[in-house]
Amino acid sequence: MIDHPLTESVTHSAQPLKVACLRVGNECYALDIMCIREIIRAQQVVPVPKAPTFVDGVVNLRKAAIPVVDLRRRFGLPKATADEPKRRIVICVIAGRIVGLLVDEVTEVCSFLSSEILPTPYYLSGPEAEFFPGVCRRGSKLMMLLDLRKLLDSEREINLGQIKEQLPADTEN
């Protein structure tokens, strides 16, 4: 298991964790809403030369150039079709930096009690595990909790196929 302040504080607190549920490809991920500034419609992204492969480029938002990370690319998924109407850019603030996350859809905002947040399974090992400090479970739905700071600080490719193989199968409740 990876110790992480976010999951530690949630599991030892009676306060529910509010997350935005983000769809990337066929999977849903949970992101703490406290790091989200706003959610905007996907717009024209200007490419930046020599940026990491998962950085799509920058967008102009209120006279500021905001870097945009394409989570599909970050997770090694194929590029989405440009005409997907539900695509959004989630503007986040992390460690004093502003960054946009390009996602296929923001499905909802929901709260998870500490009993619904499971630590990263002990058998989920390897470098990819550090990006996901926990698993949120609601009924049969599982969502990986994202550690945005680690996701953005590393340029290492994230192998989602390996992670999915190690997760327990969804169960009906």
Image: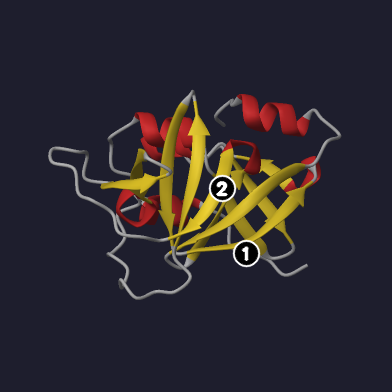
> Residue 145 location in percent, x, y?
58, 44
Residue closer to the observer: 76 or 48: 48
Circle nearer the viewer, 2 or 1: 2
As drawn, 5 above or below 33: above
Q: Residue furthest right?
A: 14
> Is 44 placed left or right of 110 in the picture?
left
Name which residue lies at 43% across and 50% down.
Answer: 163
Name which residue lies at 49% across and 23% down.
Answer: 95
- Sequence-wise first label, 2 or 1: 2
> Residue 11 location in percent, x, y?
76, 33
Name which residue lies at 38% across and 40% down.
Answer: 63
Dividing the picture into quarters, in which one does residue 4 lie?
Answer: top right
Where is mark 1, residue-wise? 170
As drawn, 121 above or below 39: above
Contact between labelled residues 1 and 2, with CB atoms less than 8 Å apart? no
Residue 81 tag number: none
Label 1 element class: loop
> Residue 64 location in percent, x, y?
37, 38
Specify the amino acid type for callout 2: Glu
Where is mark 2, residue-wise? 38
Question: Can residue 139 be seen?
Answer: yes
Would you call the spot at circle 1 few (<14 residues within 10 Å), some (14-19), or many (20 or more)? few
Name which residue lies at 48% across and 70% down.
Answer: 86
> Is 85 placed left or right of 9 in the picture?
left
> Residue 164 location in percent, x, y?
46, 56
Question: Can residue 125 be seen?
Answer: no
Specify the amino acid type for callout 1: Asp
> Is 126 placed left or right of 116 in the picture?
left
As drawn, 170 above or below 61: below
Residue closer to the observer: 48 or 26: 48
